[in-house]
Image: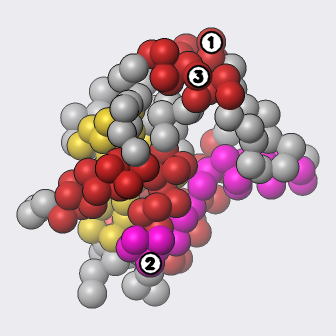
Amino acid sequence: MEPLLVLLGGLPGSGKTTLARSLARALDASHVRVDTIEQALLRCGIGDGVAGYAVGMAVTTDDLRVGRSVVADAVNAVDEARTGWRDAAAAADARVVELWVTCSDPVEHRRRVEQREADIPGHRQPTWAEATALVVDPWPTATVVETAGRTPDEVLAAALRAIDRPR
C-alpha cells in the first residue's frame, strides 16, 4: 500500500493538533508535530523555527520510506515549508493530501487561543495577536477543513472525506 502524507496547516487555535491526533489514530499513521520538535530543540539550546520543520521533514521521509503514513502537524503558513513536505513525500513515493484547518468564527477562534493550555512542557502558546498576525501564503492546492461550530468527530469525518477523494 502506498504511504500517505497528510499535510496539515492552519493558524494556532484552529484545531490542527486535535485533528492531527484523530487522523493519526484513524489512519494508523505517525503524528509528526513541529511544535513538539521545536520545543525539544529549544531544550537543547537549538532552534530557529526552521530547524523544527527540517527535523520533522526528515523523520517524515523515514516513516514514509518504510511504508508508514504520516500526519504532519504545523502552521505551514509559507509555501517554502509546504514544498519541503512535498519533497519529503516525493522522496518516498508517497501520496500527499493537503488540508488547511480553519476556524472561521473569530469569537470561537480567539476563545480557543486564549483558553488553551500548553500540552508540551515548556511550550509558550502564542497570544491572539501573534496568532492572527501570521502572514499566510496562498495555498490553492489545500482542501479547507472548517472547525467552527463542529465537533472533533465532525471535523475528522470531513478530513477523511477529503483524503478519500479520487486523485
* Helix, strand or loop status at disc 1: helix
* Helix, strand or loop status at disc 3: helix
**Residue at horizontal 22%, vertical 34%?**
140
CA distance separating discs 2 and 1:
35 Å
Q: Is residue 42 magenta?
A: yes
Q: Earlier in the sequence, mark 2 or mark 1?
A: 2
**Residue at horizontal 37%, vertical 64%?**
5
Q: Quadrant of the N terminus?
A: bottom left
* Helix, strand or loop status at disc 2: loop
Question: Residues in magenta?
Answer: 25-44
CA distance separating discs 3 and 2:
31 Å
- In the displayed structure image, the side of residue 48 where residue 107 appears, left or right: left
CA distance separating discs 3 and 1:
12 Å
Residue 9 position within the rendered picture, expressed as x and y whole percent measured from the top left: 43, 41
Q: Which mark is residue 129?
A: 1
**Residue at horizontal 48%, vertical 56%?**
20
Q: Earlier in the sequence, mark 3 or mark 1?
A: 3
Quarter-of-image position of residue 67: bottom left
Residue 13 position within the rendered picture, expressed as x and y whole percent measured from the top left: 55, 32
Three-letter code for the amino acid on which mark 1 is drawn: Ala
Three-letter code for the amino acid on which mark 3 is drawn: Arg
Q: Which residue is mark 2?
A: 28
Total numbered badges shown on the rendered structure? 3
Q: Which mark is residue 111?
A: 3
Q: Quadrant of the C terminus?
A: bottom left
Q: Is residue 157 above or below residue 79?
A: below
Q: Label 1: how many residues lie within 10 Å, few (<14), some (14-19) or many (20+)?
A: few
Residue 154 position within the rendered picture, expressed as x and y whole percent measured from the top left: 32, 50
| Residue 82 appears in view | no
**Colour style of the rendered protein structure:** secondary structure
Three-letter code for the amino acid on which mark 2 is drawn: Asp
